[in-house]
Amino acid sequence: MVPITLAAIGEIITERSGVVNIGLEGIIMLGALSSVYVGYFTGNLYLALSAGILAGIAVGILHAVISIYLAGDQVVVGVGLNLFAYGIGVITLYLTWGTFANSPIIPKGAQIPKLYGFSPFVPFTIAVGIAAWYIIERTSVGLRLKAVGENPRAADSAGINVFRVRFLATVTGSVLASLGGVFLGLDWLASYTRDISAGRGFIALAMVVFSRWNPIIAVLSGFLFGFLFAVSLSIPSGIVPDQVIWSIPYVATVIVAAGFVAKARAPAALGKPYKRE
């Protein structure tokens, strides 16, 4: 549930400001790739974590500059991020480790240690969801964020810097999605695989709608996916094709999310570049 929930919370923050980022899949890949690459060669957990965070910041800035300041098509930017991440991942695997499949296991020193048998990313993800909800719903920062996403022209007239708010929201969302990739690379798998994101970025986009742009519900949605994923792993192979079993959490999540599409109301200015007149 960790990578999907972190990406979903990040996208909620981004979309609340009026910017849509469908490049979550690629950002998860880049976060995992950069952290594993640095972790493999340094064996240092802090350097590996920093690499993953910096990758998220860099991608967030790129997306923000093109989408916000240059008024580019936000969907096209996201598609480009996904394609770039997949391509650079395959190239890095081949040039560094001579394989198109997966990297070797990273040194123990670069792996995230367990906390009472659990990954520390689990309580961290829950805390991020609660903090995001509180900031959005109970602080002036959240009020500015929602104002920019609903009516940027009115927000601008009230003295809110629309571009800066959207920029910071986009970068924050990218960093959270990248941390989802860091979890996959340094914790769960301790390596990088070509399909490491495995559609989690797209499921996170569905969960944003399912949660109605509420971080708390996004956390609960993440637990639902995690539970269904555990159920799929517990089903003995051979009863039905493995591909059907592996698809259970994805199909179930999309079906549940589809039931909320008609009831959900996106921010009014979502996906619309703002231009001062």
Image: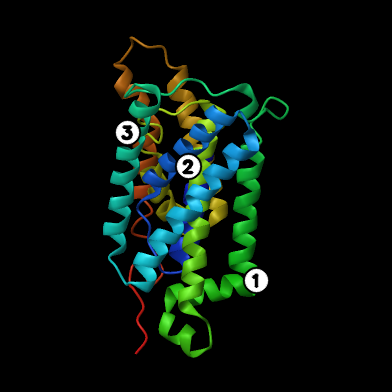
Give the quarter of the image for residue 45: top right
Q: Which quadrant holds the C terminus?
A: bottom left
- Residue situated in front as seen by the camera: 237 or 66: 66
> CB atoms at circles 1 and 3 under 8 Å apart?
no
Label 2: few (<14), some or many (≥20) within 10 Å? many
Q: Horizontal and vertical percent for residue 147?
A: 49, 77
* Kind of residue sitting beneath label 2: Gly
Mark 1 or 3, which is nearer the eye?
A: 3
Residue visible at 41% across and 85% down?
Answer: 153
Answer with mark 2 or mark 1, whichever residue precedes in sequence: 2
* Kind of residue sitting beneath label 1: Thr
* Kind of residue sitting beneath label 3: Ile
Q: Horizontal and vertical percent for residue 102?
A: 39, 23
Can I make out residue 256 in this image? no
Q: Which mark, residue 91?
A: 3
Secondary structure of the residue carrying tag 1 is loop
> CB atoms at circles 2 and 1 under 8 Å apart?
no
The image shows residue 102, relative to residue 37, as above or below, that is above
- Residue situated in front as seen by the camera: 168 or 122: 168
Residue under circle 1?
139
Residue under circle 2?
31
